[in-house]
Amino acid sequence: MVELHPAVELPLSTDELEELAEDMKDRAYAMGVLIRPSKHRTIHGPITLLPSTFPRLLYNKAMQLQTDINLLMLGISKDDEFLYAALKSVVPVDEFTRRLYEMHLQVKKEGCFKPVTLCINRTDYMLDCCKEDDEESFLDLSMVEINTIAAGCPALSTRLVDVHRFSLEQLGMSREKVLDRVPGNYGMEGVADGMVTTWRLYGETKAVLVFVVRPEESNKFDQRWMEYGIKDLDDRVKVIRRTLPEIGERAELRGDERRLFIDGMEVAILYFRTGYSPIDYPTEMEWNARLLGERSRAAVCPSVAMQLAGTKKIQQVLYDPGSIELFLKGKQRVDDVRSIFTGHYTLDLTPAGDEAAERAIANPMKYVMKPQREGGGNNLFGEKMKEALEKLRGSPERAAYMLMDRFNSPVNHNYCMKCGSSDLELMTVASEFGPFGTLVSYNNEVVFNKTTGYLYRTKDIKLDEGGLMVGTGFLDTPYLSSAEVICPSATQNGFGEH
Ligand SMILES: Nc1ncnc2c1ncn2[C@@H]1O[C@H](COP(=O)(O)OP(=O)(O)OP(=O)(O)O)[C@@H](O)[C@H]1O
Ligand SMILES: [Mg+2]
């Protein structure tokens, strides 16, 4: 197992740890790194005590690639032929994808009434240890997935930088070094900038920006901070919060231009922080909300086509040679994006799908099986994956999934603090880095395309997935290291000598 140098020497002494835990907890509250697990309870979010190491070069690479990934996703969302060809085996066997796809076709037939498009994406990466023993290229970025709907935590991640810089300073690191190693995060301001740009282009000062949320929203403060970021940029923008059933019941389209109104207010933007899972659509009312938004003049973030572009199946098809080239011009740009793709394999009922499935059954620890779902907890690993593949042998239902190489991630060590608690546990962890990308296009011309901050999160390596809201993942900040990022003296279970 490859280990990375921690930001400071570990473990900390008991006294140091107790004091720092209290300091950090208070700072997290003061900076508003908050979640709301239930209506009357607000607590600090799950956080690591220290920033976790990440190679500077790979941080720069991920941040730089994001604007091309934004263009790639926009291109896919507009390419009906590509969407059809990629999703044709999934649509008959996955009800949720089918409904989205049919809605896309239905609205497409009516023609597009939207002058402005807003896309907010997050590309998640883990570090992957290459097989070659070549020090220079030992670690690389491997893409976990591209999120095109409800990419969460741009604001809490932004707020957390201050908390983590403070933690290193409390441990005696100079401010100069801290500022060099812990990069700023402008997720909140950057994403808000894209939203305000969209709102201005929509061109109606009385129109509101609607955050589409779940009724009980534990990540409410991340959303609230976004709202305040928007207000800071342009005080004319009014943000309101509505649920899918509220929109389905109370919204309407008015006039030939199909302006969307809710509760007497015109809507400029519907920004979805929900709507990515079948459980968000218990009745036809929620689907109706989605359809109204799609048919209207309002910018919807994301459009149904963009949500489809973010499915795992599309990602798998992009791995096929020649796919990325359809959307990005220039060999270097294509090669750079291609370099983040680890192996992705079809599980369609074809000879290639059969072959991939048998390979995974024979080597269950080497692959991950993914359905077309978002929100965590849906992927299949190890024995569960093997069992599922055995069950699905010869069944067209297998096409609802795709297969991916499992990463061999290096590990960090860090203390992790659960929501609302000051208890700390020293854990062996793996981290996931996700730059946000925001793109706005107006009358089919891209007018805003930026990398807008990042999310960094960390989980116990014993777990296959780490979920922030379910208490198994922790918000983190990268500690950028240039040289000797890998612990040379690391042993299987120990910390090495750092
Ligand atoms: N190829 C892989 N190798 C190892 N772990 C993986 C791999 N793909 C995914 N994971 C783990 O599973 C988690 C969830 O994967 P993924 O992001 O594909 O699912 P999701 O349901 O879309 O999650 P999210 O809620 O983060 O959008 C990742 O955060 C990572 O910890
Ligand atoms: Mg996802």
Image: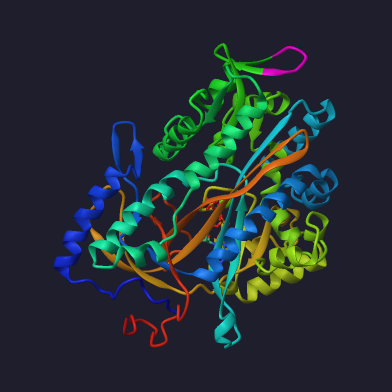
| Residue 474 magenta | no
Residue 132 located left or right of residue 485? right
Q: Nearer the viewer, residue 373 or 415?
A: 415
Front residue (pair 172, 82): 172
**Vertical side of 448 occupied by 69: above or below:** below
Toward the viewer: 477 or 77? 477
Would residue 167 be found to the left or right of residue 356 on screen? Answer: left
Residue drawn where x is 71% and y is 54% of the image: 313
**Image point 22% across, 58% down: which residue?**
21
- Counting from the top left corner in percent of width and height, residue 284 is at 63, 25
Q: Is residue 163 above or below residue 259?
A: below
Q: Is residue 199 visible?
A: yes
Q: Quadrant of the C terminus?
A: bottom left
- Image-quadrant location for residue 201: top right
Q: Residue 416 location in percent, x, y?
A: 32, 60
Residue plotted at (75% across, 44% down): 77
Q: Is residue 249 above or below residue 232?
A: above
Query: Which residue reaches farthest left?
Result: 15
Confirm whether the magenta stretch covers residue 256. Answer: yes
